Amino acid sequence: MVFTAIPFFYYLARYRRAKGFLDYVGLRKPRRRTMLHATLFALAFVLPVLSLLYFLPGARDVVSGPNTVIGGLKAHGLSGAAVALLVCKAFVQTSLSEEILFRGFLAKRLIHRLGFVSGNLLQALLFGLVHLLVFIGQEFSVAVAAGVVLFAALGGWVNGYLNERLGNGSILPSWWLHALTNAITYGVLAFALS
């Protein structure tokens, strides 16, 4: 809610109306085939992300801690409730809210002001840095933190590229890519590699 509230209240303050907010953040139909590109990017991201989290010492422990999405899924065990929770967390709580804030709000504003290269890079770096929040209250190595930040930043950059260069400014492709990557990663780490 917070990630969506920030751009919404900014929009209200600037335009003094709520009408048009969805288009403002890019919740509109993308160009044809962009969703296919998003699916292919997601599948290309899953293996490196899982490899990083599985093989980098300590990374899996950090992202599977008790106060994380994966930790919560593990606590439920493989069940219908856990699958529903996985879908809700992957598709709405993390992906949709982050895409509205980072690609629908920040990327669009930064790209408009700084140009595509600088604006997209800056929003991607901010997106990567936000992923340091998963480390709060946990022991971790600099290598683990750097790996998580860099992979998240790379994903943020690809999402910005996908939306702004291929998707007609729509955030639906990046939402799909982000949600699909998260759902597969959460599911594998919570249930298959426990």
Image (cartoon, rainbow, N blue to C red):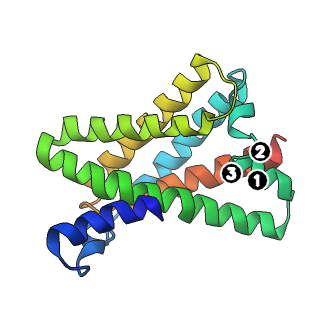
CB-based contact (under 8 Å), mark 1 and mark 3:
yes
Label 3, residues with CA under 10 Å away: few <14, some 14-19, many ≥20 = many
Query: What residue does disc 3 label?
Result: 69
Alpha carbon distance from label 1 to label 3: 5 Å
CB-based contact (under 8 Å), mark 2 and mark 1:
yes
Rendered image: mark on residue 66? 2
Estimate the x, y position of residue 125 in percent, counting from the top left: 36, 34
Q: Along the horizontal axis of the image, is 35 left or right of 142?
A: left
Residue closer to the observer: 82 or 45: 82
Query: What residue does disc 1 label?
Result: 72
Up/down of 66 relative to 141, above or below: below
- Label 3 sits on a secondary structure element that is helix
Up/down of 174 relative to 50, above or below: below
What residue do we see at 62% from left, 33% from top?
135
Q: Quadrant of residue 142?
A: top right
Q: Amino acid at mark 2?
A: Pro
